[in-house]
Image (cartoon, rainbow, N blue to C red):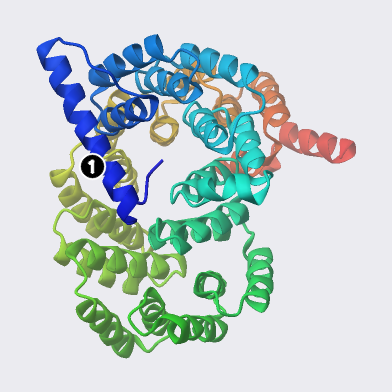
Amino acid sequence: MTEDWSDPEELEEKEELEASLHRFQQMVERQGHAFFDEDEYIYIIDHFMAIEELGMAEKAIVQSLERYPDNVALQLRQVGLLSARQHTDAALRNLRRIDAAHPEADAFSLYEEAVLYLDLQQWEEAEAKFNAVLAMPKSERDEVLQDPNFYNDLSELYETRGKLLMAVTAKMEAIRKKSADPADLNELIRQITETGQTGSAINFFTSRTDEHPLSAPDWFCLGKLQMEAEQYNEAIASLHNVQALCGENTEATAEIAAIQILTGARQNGEAELDLYLDQNRCSRNERLRWYDQVAQYAYDRSQFTLCTRFCQKAIDTQSDDIYGYLLMALALGESEKYEQGLQVLEKALQFNPDHFDAQLLAGEYLMRTGRMEEAGDMLRDCCVRFPEEDRAWFCYTIYLVQCGYIDEAINLLNHAVASRNNPQFIYRLSNCYFMKGENQLGRFYLNMAYAEDPEGLDDFLHFDENLLNHPEILSFLNEIKFYD
């Protein structure tokens, strides 16, 4: 958690704590002894944890707990150290012990426990602690809620649990406290769109703007969601409200320019976007973010020529922009310009030879251009270098099937089924057995895959469209229709 040191008294306190930190460092260097109170130890430990000097943090924790063994804040910092050193089981065991011993913890302790549960990926317990803070009387929770990281951490939790509207709302609170990057909010809104919640999200933020007409973050969220839903006139109106509240030099101006670019007024929109970037003296990274973002907008709307144009602007801004190269290659692939896509991917791999997505896409494009030997080498290398990536194994399986190496594909898939928890491998194994004419095994694995993942059936059927008229498949489809 962070502190606001703008108050003169708090500034004086900070200077005293920094002096304590200096004394502690001197004590360690000289192997001497010194007295520190509980607040001083907390500041010293947090400092060393923040700069990842875990050895110094450990020294401070050991000394502090010898002197103040019942201090909950110090005990929680010991949990944080265990977590930072990847001693997950010990960290979780200690955290739950502290939690059980102090059921009536104050808001600060509850928040610290919430963050530790979040770090340890114990989502339910983390959410329970955050909710406990929010449920406390206003006078007890207010100081914690002023911490600029509280709502960022809460947003991260909601996002992890798939509660995207709640994640956006928490992120907006963080932005109001000027502790969050609007780019994070853009990413959350994009996730809402991808999960098909855009309509309900628009209704939610329409209600929010009715209740809070002077809230620029609410109007911005509404405008972004309307833009994602291609409700461009409504989006521009919402974003104009942001400009009215915050002035022209806001991200809303750039979003309006992006809408103009997407809706045909490209030259005017590009001029407006560049003017915004110039007037705000945006850094190279900020320019890059906007060019990449407009390129992504265009790709999502199947405007592939426009996408490649803005990818090129991004690459011209920063020559090693892997995101720009990859998105350009995808757009060229959508236009069936695979050779050009391969040239782009070759440049990307020159900058980052270890980029998994670029190597995998290059392997796929080599297959599409009939360069099967090169494709096999590329995809085989991908599986060796990135053995944890299921997509590499899937793509290599496709290569083996296209080359007629069905037995090799079956061996690969049997290994994948035994070592991974992914029903799609079972579907592919079924595909291969049907292709080989071993219908009994094909049906066996199809039943198994469908029991684990009914939604994967469409991909199974489209992997080999000859199966659509296969008697065994027709029998299976009739059976599941009967039971449904």
Q: Nearer the viewer, residue 232 or 19?
A: 19
Q: Nearer the viewer, residue 327 or 464?
A: 327
Residue 70 to residue 200: above or below: above
Q: Residue at x 59, y 18 (%)?
A: 96
Is residue 456 at all visible to an observer of this figure?
no
* Amino acid type, callout 1: Glu
Among the 4 quarters of the image, the one containing residue 32: top left
Residue 55 to residue 328: above or below: above
Is residue 254 at all visible to an observer of this figure?
yes
Image location of residue 195, percent across then percent down: 60, 54
Residue 351 to residue 267: above or below: above
Image location of residue 323, percent across then percent down: 28, 54
Quarter containing the N terminus: top left
Q: Secondary structure at mark 1?
A: helix
Looking at the image, which residue sits at the far left? Answer: 30
Give the crowd class for mark 1: few <14, some 14-19, many >=20 residues within 10 Å: few
Quarter containing the C terminus: top right
Image location of residue 434, percent across then percent down: 61, 28
Among the 4 quarters of the image, the one containing residue 229: bottom right
